[in-house]
Image (cartoon, helix red, strand yellow):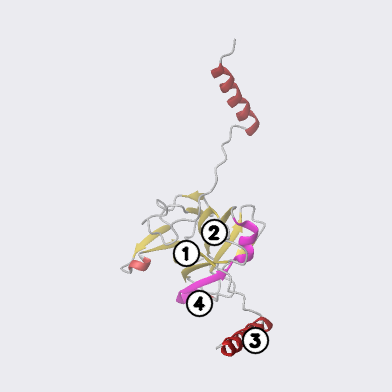
C-alpha cells in the first residue's frame, strides 16, 4: 500500500522524467558593468584555442585599479600568438522597457591597443541567445576613435522591443590580423539606461482655443465687476 510520501516521490519522478531531469536556470539581470566588485563577477572569458575560461584566473584578462572613484576599475583583455582571438562576455536577462514610448541605450568607455591598426580588430555586439539578431555596437566608430579611447552610446530600443525580458549576450572581442601580438582593449563603465518619452506638445488649435477661453473669462469677470 502506497503512502502519501510514496505518491509525492512518484510525482516528482514523473516530473523529472518529462523535463529530462533538467532544472531551467534563468540568467540574472546585467551586473558589474563598471567592475565595482573588483573582479569579473557576472562575466565570462572565451579564447579561440581553449573556449570558455574564468577571467578571474586566466592571464588574458586583467583589472586595473585607477585613482578615479567614478571609474575605479578598468577591464583589459589581450590576445597572443596561440589565442589570437580573445573575448569578454556576459549573458543576462535584458530589462523590460518601462512603458510605451520609452527608449533604451547602452554606453561604455573603450580603447584599443593594436600592433597594426589596419589589420587588428575590435568588435562589440549585443545578440539574442539564438544569435538571430545582432547589433553592432561599434557602428560609426572609427579605428582612430578606438585607439584614442572613446565613450560609445548606442540606441538599442528596437533590439529591446524584441528581446526585453529575455536572455541576451554582450560580447567584446579583440582579434589579431597581422600575426603580431599582443593586441588588447580596455573597457569600463558599461551601463544600460532607459529614457522616458518626451511630453507631447499641444496642437496649435488647442492653444488658440485655450487663449480664447481665457480672454472670454477675463471679459466676463470685468463686465460683472
The quarter of the image holding the N terminus is top right
| Residue hosting label 1 | 190
Q: Earlier in the sequence, mark 3 or mark 4?
A: 4
Q: Earlier in the sequence, mark 2 or mark 4?
A: 4
Residue at figure coordinates x 40%, y 59% from the top left: 35
Residue farthest to the left, as pictured = 67
User: Disc 4 or disc 1, which is closer to the eye?
Assistant: 1
Expressed as whole percent of the image width and height from the top left, the position of residue 113 reads 45, 70
Q: Quick check: 80 above or below 57?
A: below
Residue 182 falls within the magenta-colored stretch? no
Q: Earlier in the sequence, mark 3 or mark 1?
A: 1
Q: Crowdedness of circle 3 by 10 Å Cα count: few (<14), some, many (20+)?
A: few
Residue 182 appears anywhere in the view: no
Q: Crowdedness of circle 2 by 10 Å Cα count: few (<14), some, many (20+)?
A: some
The secondary structure type at the circle numbered 2 is strand
Q: CA distance from mark 2 to mark 4?
A: 21 Å
Magenta region: 144-164
Q: CA distance from mark 2 to mark 1?
A: 10 Å
User: Disc 3 or disc 2, which is closer to the eye?
Assistant: 3
Label disc, if present, on residue 145 of the rendered structure: 4
Dots 2 and 1: beta carbons under 8 Å? yes
Label disc, if present, on residue 98 of the rendered structure: none
Expressed as whole percent of the image width and height from the top left, the position of residue 184 reads 46, 65
Q: CA distance from mark 3 to mark 1?
A: 51 Å
| Residue hosting label 3 | 212
The secondary structure type at the circle numbered 4 is helix
User: Disc 3 or disc 4, which is closer to the eye?
Assistant: 3
Dots 3 and 1: beta carbons under 8 Å? no
Q: CA distance from mark 4 to mark 1?
A: 17 Å
| Residue hosting label 2 | 170
Amino acid at each position: 500500500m502506497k503512502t502519501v510520501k510514496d505518491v509525492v516521490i512518484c510525482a516528482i519522478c514523473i516530473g523529472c522524467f518529462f523535463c529530462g531531469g533538467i532544472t531551467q536556470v534563468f540568467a540574472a539581470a546585467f551586473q558589474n558593468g563598471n567592475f565595482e566588485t573588483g573582479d569579473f563577477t557576472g562575466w565570462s572569458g572565451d579564447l579561440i584555442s581553449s573556449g570558455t575560461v574564468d577571467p578571474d584566473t586566466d592571464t588574458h584578462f586583467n583589472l586595473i585599479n585607477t585613482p578615479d572613484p567614478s571609474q575605479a576599475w578598468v577591464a583589459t583583455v589581450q590576445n597572443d600568438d596561440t589565442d589570437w582571438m580573445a573575448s569578454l562576455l556576459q549573458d543576462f536577462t535584458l530589462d523590460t522597457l518601462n512603458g510605451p514610448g520609452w527608449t533604451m541605450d547602452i554606453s561604455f568607455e573603450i580603447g584599443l591597443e593594436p600592433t597594426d591598426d589596419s589589420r587588428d580588430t575590435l568588435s562589440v555586439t549585443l545578440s539574442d541567445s539564438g544569435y538571430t539578431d545582432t547589433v553592432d555596437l561599434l557602428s560609426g566608430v572609427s579605428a582612430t576613435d578606438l585607439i584614442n579611447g572613446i565613450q560609445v552610446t548606442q540606441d538599442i530600443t528596437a533590439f529591446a522591443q524584441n528581446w526585453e525580458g529575455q536572455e541576451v549576450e554582450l560580447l567584446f572581442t579583440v582579434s589579431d590580423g597581422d600575426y603580431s601580438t599582443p593586441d588588447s582593449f580596455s573597457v569600463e563603465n558599461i551601463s544600460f539606461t532607459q529614457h522616458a518619452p518626451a511630453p507631447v506638445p499641444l496642437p496649435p488649435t488647442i492653444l488658440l482655443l485655450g487663449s480664447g477661453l481665457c480672454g472670454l473669462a477675463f471679459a466676463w469677470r470685468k463686465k460683472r465687476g
